[in-house]
């Protein structure tokens, strides 16, 4: 026996709600349920909605529980964050304190180092991209104490530029205008 629809709505009311709806999915669902109110079978309502009978049953259950607003597409919740507030607080403390070279083996935190520390400390595996996103959320605009790659502490500011090779330009000057090569 199919699940009965609510008694406080009718087909005309659902069609009016479908016309006013700004959500295409909700309008399609409302029209399918309006057909059921008119006496159509569930399989016919499924054809109107472009789904199976089981999906129509799910729509009926949501409609009975929440009314027309229950048929609006909701945003999926997504995966739960891997880092908790306690993890984030410990991460902030670790960045503010800075690494101890003898203990951590680095002079300056990199994203991969922080990912490794997070795994060793909490057994939580996260990617460097996720770590970067977490750090941006913790300190918008900057990631203090974290570098993209390691740099020697005694490196001079312009030393790298002195060793870069320069290539000759790819273009050559054209001949003087008005002269052309001789042909015989």
Image: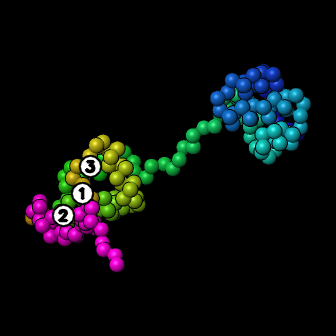
The residue depicted at 38 percent of the width and 56 percent of the height is 129
Magenta segment, prevailing SS (helix, strand or loop): loop
- Residue 147's tag is 1
CA gap, disc 1 to disc 3? 8 Å
- 74 or 181: nearer the viewer: 181
CA gap, disc 2 to disc 1? 9 Å
Crowdedness near tag 1: few (<14), some (14–19) or many (≥20) residues, C-alpha within 10 Å: few
The residue depicted at 39 percent of the width and 54 percent of the height is 130
For the residues labelled 1 and 3, say whether their Cβ atoms are less than 8 Å apart. Answer: no
Q: Position of residue 33 (x, y in %)?
A: 80, 32
In the rendered image, the quadrant that contains the N terminus is top right
- Residue 110's tag is none
SS of the residue under disc 2: loop
Residue beneath disc 3: 143
**For residue 157: magenta?**
yes
**For residue 49: magenta?**
no
Mark 2 or 3: the one toward you: 2
């Amino acid at each position: 026996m199919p699940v009965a629809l609510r008694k406080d709505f009718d087909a005309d009311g659902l069609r009016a709600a479908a016309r006013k709806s700004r959500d295409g999915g909700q309008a399609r669902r409302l029209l399918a349920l309006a057909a059921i109110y008119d006496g159509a079978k569930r399989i016919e309502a499924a054809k109107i909605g472009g789904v199976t009978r089981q999906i129509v049953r799910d729509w009926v259950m949501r409609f009975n529980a929440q009314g027309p607003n229950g048929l609006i597409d909701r945003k999926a919740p997504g995966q739960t964050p891997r880092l908790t507030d306690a993890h984030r607080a410990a991460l902030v403390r670790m960045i503010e304190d800075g690494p101890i070279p003898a203990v951590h083996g680095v002079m300056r935190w990199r994203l991969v180092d922080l990912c490794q520390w997070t795994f060793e400390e909490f057994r939580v595996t996260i990617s460097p991209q996720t770590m970067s996103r977490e750090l941006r959320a913790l300190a918008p605009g900057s990631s203090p104490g974290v570098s993209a790659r390691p740099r020697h502490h005694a490196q001079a500011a312009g030393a790298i530029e002195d060793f870069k090779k320069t290539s000759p330009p790819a273009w050559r000057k054209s001949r003087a205008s008005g002269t052309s090569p001789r042909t015989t």
